[in-house]
Amino acid sequence: MGEPVGLRLYFTQAEANELRTATLGNNGNAPGLPCTQNDDFSDNTGLTDLFVTKYSGTNENGVYTDNLSSGTYRVFGTDFGIPGSPDGPLTKAPNQFSTVFSGGPGYHYVQLNVTEFSEFWLHGSYHGAPLPVEMIYFQAEAVNNSYIKLSWATAIEINNDGFMVERSTDAQTWSNIGWVEGHDNATVQHDYSFNDYNVEANVRYYYRLKQLDNDGQFEYTTIVSEMITAQSTFAVKDFVPNPTMNNTSLLVSSSEAQEIEVKFYDILGQVVSSSKHALHTGGNQLTFSLEHLAAGTYTAVVTSHNEVYSKKLVVTR
């Protein structure tokens, strides 16, 4: 770190043409996907649309695809009065190489002031308009195996009206299931979430966000997916104590309030004891008095409306 110095990046007309072709042709600038348009370098005669991003952080190796969201990004370019951009000015000089070396070829250059060297790349910015929303992440996770929580965060928002949450079961046909308000203009991280409670077990759900600007333009995020699985409504642990002389207990955990029945069978398969118990959500301790039973091995069968557990119990005298 130190006093700012001027850094010039030189490039040929052929390189400028390659950049122009790449940004104008990225998947045809797909309708409804402003992100494929906002990187356009479309100035055929000058460098008006040209910007420079400076990256500092892990993987400063000249490959922008492995840069991390934890790094520092600074954008240099023309100030069009859009909140949060750019971070610094950029001097754009077409056909100026010959002014440095007399008789040299007409290379272009851009110049920015920096206090340290790192990683730089040139890109277009659709007449200076940066991406309306810079996403940090978008994820889906099953919570307590009962609902699906969507979480996402933005680093920059420009005229962001909000996010329409869309869901699909085949990643082809989508339906709108909710709306989350945006922060309009912001240059700090904002975290968002949406809970989808209307889900069924063993069905994979796909989600995407449709980010809408205040002027009606929109773009889609990447697609994420998640599912919940069918699960038991209650679980039964072993008898404690076991063996026992008179009394014993079962710990039963339940995901919902329900009634169960416990029957004790002797070695001949005859029912020697039967009782019903109302469970509440969470842990339930069921105590059994066994003074009337003879010494021996018994099988306890615990049943609900659709589940059955069996546990062995030894009674001593």
Image: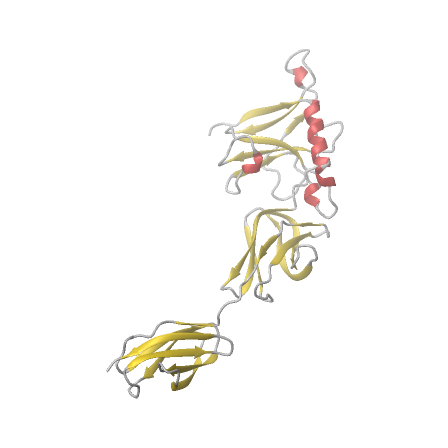
Left or right placement of residue 269 versus residue 55 in this view: left
Q: Is residue 5 above or below residue 215?
A: above
Identify the residue shown where x is 56% and y is 60%: 227
Residue farthest to the left, as pictured: 317
Residue shown at 69% from the left, 41% from the top: 36
Whether residue 40 sits left or right of residue 299 in the image: it is right
Quadrant, the C terminus:
bottom left
Is residue 80 toward the left or the right of residue 251 in the image?
right
Residue 114 shows in this picture: yes
Residue 216 drawn at (x, y percent) = 73, 52
Q: Position of residue 153 (x, y in %)?
A: 56, 51
Work out which residue is located at the far bottom of the displayed protein and give it: 292
Choose between 196 and 155: the one closer to the eye: 196
Q: In front here: 209 or 248? A: 248
Coordinates of residue 128 in the picture (x, y in percent) = 68, 38
Examine the rendered structure and indicate whether residue 11 appears above or below residue 305.
above
User: Nearest the camera: 226 or 275?
Assistant: 275
Vertical relation: 234 (above or below) 107: below
Decide if residue 94 is in sight here: no
The image shows residue 140, relative to residue 120, as above or below, that is below
The colour scheme applied to this rendered structure is: secondary structure
